[in-house]
Amino acid sequence: MINNMEENIIEVKNVKKIYRMGKERICAVDDVSFTIKRGEFCCLYGASGSGKSTLLNLMAGIEKLSGGQIIIKGKNIHKMSEKGLAKFRQDNLGFVFQSYNLMNSMTALENVELPLIFKRVKTKKRKKLARDMLIKVGLGNRLKHRPKEMSGGQQQRVGIARAFVSNPEIVFADEPTGNLDSKTSQEVMDLIKEMSKQNHQTIVMVTHDRRLAEYADKIIHIFDGKIENIEYPHKQSVTVSEITSAEHTGEPVIA
Ligand code: ADP
Ligand code: MG
């Protein structure tokens, strides 16, 4: 059990991403290595243009690597077939987007049902799971509303319900509160944190906002495509075993 809790669910090894724009080469992610433990809330934090979204998209298998490896649950996701990767994502990953990415023609309930339709969950069970999840995020009275009939905060709650409804082990979130005011942002962050801690889910979130980064157990500071520092904002000090294991995995030791 203890082993299981301490498992590195994500391993990022010497990851590189180079974009070619005509003659120019942009190294968006430059030889980055770190690990994330099961149940950890991890934040990729840095200025705009530092490579956070690129790194997240590589970790989620949305973009192709230029070099290195990404291992999730022991599997090298960039070695999978397209079909295999699609299935792996369906079974293990959830996504929350800055712009919500809801289907405008569908109700809140139908939006939350979508991932379950892809997983071929039967109608009755699907509707119940989606409804229960919307109640959980505080939208029990908005089931039949369409995105345009809801506030930004409500739409993102639907986005969160959709990401969590299939109980994925890992949820990726790119600036999930980027379009929200600060009070609503806090509410949405509290919700993401509460949901993930309840089910021991792993969160990888991108933000450029220090206050939001502090919701995380671990803050990975990104600068110019590289890791500048790894910070544990809620820990008093680092234990010897952590330093040893960090050295072992090639993860930079906390500055
Ligand atoms: P962040 O999310 O930290 O703001 P990004 O990962 O979006 O940063 O971008 C990192 C760098 O890579 C930037 O310099 C950006 O211009 C460049 N970049 C991102 N996506 C592309 C792309 N599809 N083609 C070319 N360059 C890109
Ligand atoms: Mg970004």
Image: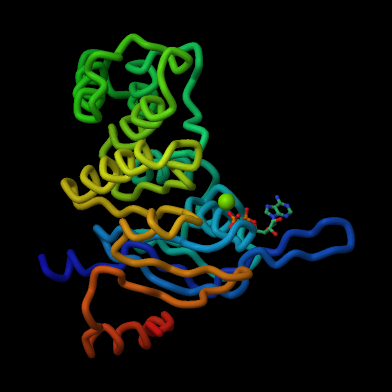
Q: Please provide percent x and percent y for residue 5.
A: 18, 64
Image quarter (top left, top right, bottom left or bottom right) of the C terminus = bottom left
Residue 138 lies in quadrant: top left
Q: Where does the image place residue 26, in percent across and percent down from the top left? A: 75, 64
Check the image and tell me how it is coloured: rainbow
Residue 73 shown left or right of residue 95 in the figure? left
Residue 36 horizontal/vertical position (percent): 34, 66
Q: Nearer the viewer, residue 109 or 113?
A: 109
Task: Judge whether 202 appears above or below 29 on screen.
Answer: above
**Could one spot residue 78 in this view of the protein?**
no
Up the image or down, 134 lies above or below 194; here it is: above
Report x, y in % for residue 185: 38, 41
Classify 6 as above or below 211.
below
Seen from this angle, which residue lies furthest left?
1
Residue 3 can be seen, yes or no: yes
Which residue lies at the image location 89% right of the left edge and 62% below the top edge?
23
- Choose top left, top right, bottom left or bottom right for residue 177: top left
Residue at x 38%, y 54% (from the top left corner): 212
Work out whether residue 12 or residue 176 is closer to the camera in this orientation and state it: 176
Query: In the displayed structure, would residue 235 be above or below residue 161?
Result: below
- Residue at image coords 38%, 81%: 249
**Viewer-proximal residue, 8 or 186?**
186
Count of numbered badges drawn on the protein: 0
Indicate the quadrant containing the N terminus: top left, top right, bottom left or bottom right.
Answer: bottom left
Name the residue located 42 percent from the left edge and 44 percent from the top edge: 89
